[in-house]
Amino acid sequence: MRKFYLIVLLVMFTVSARGQSEVYQQKKMAKLAVKSPFEKIWDGELPAEVVYKDEEIIAFVPLRRQTPVHYLIVPKKRIATINDLKDDDALLVGKMFLVARDLAKQYGIAETGYRLAINTNEDAGQSVFHLHLHLLGGMKTGPMVDQTYKDPNPRKGDE
């Protein structure tokens, strides 16, 4: 029995050493225990500038835009992260991308270019645990990361 507990502790330590920080996990659990801000927007409890809404998806301007054209595209179904997707969510997620395509056309950024982004968990900076797709455009957005990472094993010709 003692060996069993030792193994459980070892597994827990290994997972937590490579997983999310304890502070982040606590914040995440607290946020998952209540309605997401997106659910409150959907239900009319929080104001938002809605640019698209149907039975499954809502799109709106976020509180802090990061580009001149910035919309959050959110499914009505609460899915905490990409990691929590089920196979039967495939059509819903695909529809999110189609809504993004249509909004890009509608707001004049389809031809000049735009970025779609989904942040997942701590290292990506996810702070709202309800899947959402950022549509960003209306300016040159540059690289997605700051380009300071140097690959220790570059492909031949990329050095």
Image (cartoon, rainbow, N blue to C red):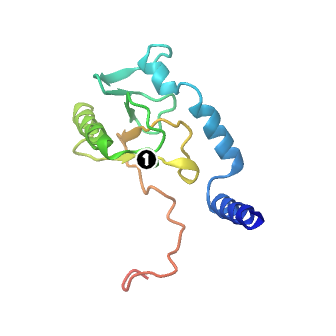
Q: Determine whether 132 is above or below 15 in the image.
A: above
Pinpoint residue 67: horizontal percent, then vertical percent: 43, 39
Is 105 left, or right, of 68 in this rendering? Answer: left
In this figure, which residue is indicated by the disc labeled 1?
A: 82
Query: Hey, which residue is sitting farthest top in the picture?
Result: 44
Bin the neighbour count of mark 1 within 10 Å (Cα to Cα): few under 14, some 14-19, many 20 and up.
some
In the image shown, does 148 or 123 lie closer to the viewer?
123
Residue appearing at x 46%, y 29% in the figure: 62
Looking at the rendered structure, the kind of residue marked 1 is Ile
Image height of 15 relative to 105, above or below: below
Residue 66 at x, y percent in the picture: 47, 39
Front-most of 41 and 154? 41
Q: In which quarter of the image is residue 111?
A: top left
Residue reaching furthest to the right: 2
Relative side of 81 to 55, left or right: right
Quadrant where the C terminus is found in the figure: bottom left
Q: Which residue is drawn at the image coordinates 40% and 40% (left, top)?
A: 134
Q: Which residue lies furthest to the front in this view?
A: 1
Residue shown at 58% from the left, 50% from the top: 122
Q: Choose top left, top right, bottom left or bottom right for residue 31.
A: top right
The picture places residue 52, in percent across and down from the top left corner, at: 30, 24
User: Within the image, what quadrant is residue 54 found in?
Assistant: top left
Check disc 1 and report its element: helix, strand or loop.
helix
Q: Where is residue 156 in the image (x, y as percent from the top left)?
A: 37, 86
Residue 41's place in the image compared with 26, above or below, is above
Quadrant housing the N terminus? bottom right
Q: Closest to the observer: 155 or 18?
A: 18
